[in-house]
Amino acid sequence: MRLDRLKAMMPAPATGGDSIDWATAEAALGRRFPTDYREFIELYGAGTISDHLGVAHPVSVSGPGERPTDVAEETEEARFTFGRTRAGLPAEVVDDSALIGWGHSDAADALCWLAIGPDSDRWPVVVWSDFERKWLVHDVGMVDFLVGLLAGELDECPLSDLSLWGRPSQQFINWRDA
């Protein structure tokens, strides 16, 4: 399982992940979250990978630590970018509703799912590369994307900087510990 491989590269925080009422979160989203994202959030929670890549919380939260971004905020940012350019997106993406944001990089890249079709476990990751000024589609889920990024196993670095590319020893910082 790819989550086991990710755990070997980036141990889960000692404080654990986030406990989520998935029915409520999915009702707010209007769609089912991908299984690998749900498993990631339950194990790691929302937060950052070595302060270079932020993973959004499924819903807006408050509490100790710095409040993480949430999926609604990440989605709003991604859809704003979509309004400026569609470069790199498949032709079947006719409006911004296909983009659901789940994260961002410290180099202003947006990390999203390309939500085409009813099966969220088949949604590929799409990245707005601020450096390349276009969308880059990766036909993998979120956890496989993170494994590919940290192991340097994707076709090329999907982010605008190389901070995490091919560097499999990383620390995840849960938002409550920030």
Image (tube, rainbow, N blue to C red):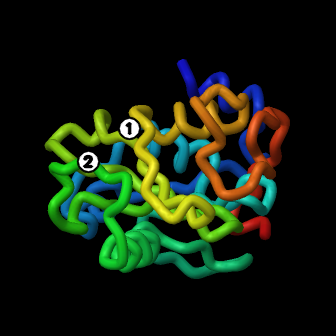
Callout 1 secondary element: helix
Local crowd size for mark 1, using a 10 Å CA cut-off: few (<14), some (14–19), many (≥20): some
Point out the tag, 2 or 1, that comes first from the N-terminus. 1
Instruction: Please name the residue that numbered disc 1 is placed on.
Output: 35
- In the image, is 129 to the left or to the right of 37? right
**Is residue 56 visible in the rendered structure shown here?**
no
Total marks placed: 2
Quadrant showing the N terminus: top right
Callout 2 secondary element: loop
Q: Write down the quadrant of residue 24 in the picture.
A: bottom left
Q: Write down the quadrant of residue 94 in the picture.
A: bottom left
Q: Nearer the viewer, residue 82 or 57?
A: 82
Which amino acid type corresponds to the residue marked 1 in the rendered image?
A: Thr
- The numbered mark at residue 90 is 2
Q: Nearer the viewer, residue 156 or 59?
A: 156
Quadrant showing the C terminus: bottom right
The location of residue 8, given as percent across then percent down, is 75, 26
**Is residue 76 visible in the rendered structure shown here?**
yes
Q: Which residue lies at the image location 74% right of the left edge and 41% below the top edge? A: 165
The location of residue 146, given as percent across then percent down, is 60, 39
The location of residue 135, given as percent across then percent down, is 43, 56
Q: Nearer the viewer, residue 63 or 157?
A: 157
The location of residue 26, given as percent across then percent down, is 27, 59
Which amino acid type corresponds to the residue marked 2 in the rendered image?
A: Pro
Q: Which residue lies at the image location 66% right of the left edge and 23% below the top edge? A: 5
Alpha carbons under labels 2 and 1: distance apart: 24 Å
Q: Which residue lies at the image location 59% right of the left edge and 31% below the top edge? A: 154
